[in-house]
Amino acid sequence: MPCEKQPRFLILYGSQKGQAQSIAEGIADEAAEHGLVAEISCLSRHEEYRLERESAPVVFIVSTTGDGEPPDTTLKFVKTIRAKTLPSDFLKNLHYALLALGDTNYANFCNCGKTIDKRLQELGANHFYATGHADDGTGLEVVLDPWIEGVWDAIKAALSKMSSSSHPPLKETLSDMTKENPAPTSPPHVELNRLSLADNKTPDSIKAPFDSDTKLTLGGLPSTEVTGLSSESDVAAAKSAQEAQTDQVREECVVAEPSLTYSLPPLSQSSLNVPALPPPYLEATLLLEDKAEKFNSSLHTETFYEVPVTNAVQMTRGDSVKKALLLELDISAHPTMTYMPGDSFDVLCPNRASEVDAVLLRLGLQDQKHQRVQLAVRRDTQKRGAQTPPHVPDNCTVQYLLTWCLEIRSVPKKAFLRALVDCAGDSRQKRRLQELCSKQGSADYNRFIRDSSLCLPELLTEFSSCTPPLSLLIEHLPKLQPRPYSAASSTLRHPGRLRFIFTVVELPACPGRPEGRRGLCSGWLADLVAPVLVRPGTDESSCGQAQLPQIHVRMRLSGTFHAPTDPTAPLIMVGPGTGLAPFLGFLQQREIERRDSPDVAFGETWLFFGCRHKDGDYLFREELEGFVSSGTLTHLKLCFSRDAAAAAAGGEEAAVPAVSQPPPACPRYVQHNLRLHSQRVSRLLLRHDARLYVCGDARNMAKDVNDTLMEMVRAELQLDQLDAMKTLAALREEKRYLQDIWG
């Protein structure tokens, strides 16, 4: 009897950093368990699919990057479907589902997914499943897990419906698949609630509920059921976890708080739903020197330019809470490295040497770190479309791989934790890893791993019995991404130079991280320039003749975050702290343009700047005051949050200066200053074609500024909240309200 052909569906993903691709590949890997065949492709590979002719259901997984922009891999697809020449029934035969990834800490949440979804509908395409909007700001899995859980029945229902007219034999096959789950006649309802950022309570969907079906063994101690196990190693892990229960329950009488490595009831006594074990697909072979081909590390950096750091200055006082540095790069040897104020650039940085050494030690590879790694796809792998990752160069050394290729600082995903279960030798640690990757353990995963930004070296330190193979790290760790920085200069003022400012990020200690650590790139840059750094109260001569450090950079040209081409348009800039960076370039360029075009009536310019203390954190004070003196900057509105707080409390610290706002009004943050000048700013923005730019922290400042702007629009135009939101959205569409923000 001939084998029946399994029904197929298509997965298309658009990914910037690998998140959407990883989710798409996970869905493809799971398809066989549901009697389906998944074809998967990146949206950039247009030759592999034709949506207008597609006869199978299509699942889109797309992320959003920047200021609501599509990922690089999705740009051409979005441009294609937005063509005005396409008829309204162009995709009338397309049946699709879409999962959009975003972060509510940023503006234009899930904008790429929403844009694609809206345009597909305009072209006649049909939903077969509710669109999901997963929020990385509160945890993708809150929406992701139930969305994926429900998509399988929806795909089968769509296949059954689509086959009824054109593929009768397929309908018979599908009828067997859907006997237990009858096909719905309309897209199934999926509850896709996102967490409210204003809600401090943990939603029920991510709490670890007590399982009333937990079994009791002799002595009244609970045994553990772990569902979703698909291999002998899974079963063995479950048994060893059960054996660990007795000791754990005894210890629970003493320990009152859960930790990264320890749980309490009801979680410690619950049955667990763990993800399926991701199929391994790579073999990593270490080659001896005489068998290894020569590795050219320059190929890995071929899109970057190596440039010297000609100047490094500490901009904040030594006792400041945050250390801000100004670096100047000499790009004169690379004439193709051009930029405009508002553009940004990437810095290629390595993983921290001490963390690489810790991983090498745990993997038992410290003596083999200079051996070459040869990667190949396993012949017995069950992963569809498996291939060696393109970001790992051929025949690189183990040390190079862990230093320059893999993001060992990335937060381990649940699929990675699931794979690590089989690598742990201690039964209690196996159980805890199962809990952390389970549905019941979502709250603990968020608390101890995700929210703490815990990384692999820290995880391995706490789970001392876990020794994963190198191939597992290559399979699960994403590519080490370069870090973006905003240009803080104009080539008109600094020809052949590129300046940028940054704060050295400090991550505090937390459970699983006994000591704080610095941000990967900012900490590396601070160490790199330490020998030549000019500190407050010193001059450049005090640094001696230290050799200039070199870094690898590449430009990231902005399509929108530029000063208006019309010099008469008013310019409103909001940039506290190092968010000031692009506006320095704006003002440097404006000053020279004013000098060269004395007859032009330039529009007024506003800058809202803030920091903690006037004396210790006021960046570029002399330069900003110079812009005011020359008339380049019409209004400089300042606020010093800690000084204002001290003044309000009757302290002796300096009050806010008159240039910001005269007493008794002492604004603490930039949004407060915006509110004080609400009428003038609103009228410029709404009646005089002004451009508004916001740069800086996404998690707090940008949200607060946006809320303030909404209130300003409501008051100025006498609108309700919904219409005020629409007005701000229209300003965004017109590129008159722009953001360059980061988390």
Image (tube, rainbow, N blue to C red):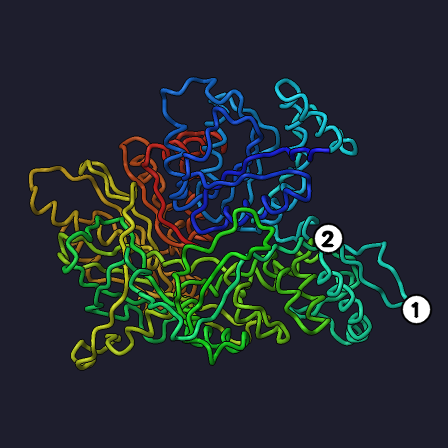
Is residue 394 shown left or right of residue 529? Answer: right
- Residue name at image x 47 percent, y 53 percent: 699
Mark 1: which amino acid?
Leu
User: Disc number at residue 664?
Assistant: none
Mark 2: which amino acid?
Gly
> Quadrant of the rendered structure where residue 421 is?
bottom right
- Residue name at image x 14 percent, y 55 percent: 493
> Vertical placement of 67 versus 319: above or below?
above
For the residue pair 658 and 250, the one nearer the viewer reads as 250
Mark 1 or 2: in front is 2
User: Disc number at residue 228?
Assistant: 2
Q: Residues within 10 Å of mark 2 (few under 14, many from 20)?
A: some
Q: Are marks 1 and 2 in contact (CB under 8 Å)?
A: no
Visible residue check, residue 660: no
Is residue 605 shown left or right of residue 365? Answer: left
> Vertical placement of 143 versus 617: above or below?
above
Give residue 122's position: percent from left, percent from top: 47, 22
Number of dots carrying numbers: 2
Give residue 219's position: percent from left, percent from top: 92, 70
Secondary structure found at label 2: loop
Q: CA distance from mark 1 to mark 2?
A: 26 Å
Secondary structure found at label 1: helix
Q: Which residue is denoted by mark 1 in the rendering? A: 218
Is residue 673 shown left or right of residue 562? Answer: right
Give residue 113's position: percent from left, percent from top: 48, 37
The quarter in which the C terminus is drawn is: bottom left
Q: Residues within 10 Å of mark 1 (few under 14, many from 20)?
A: few
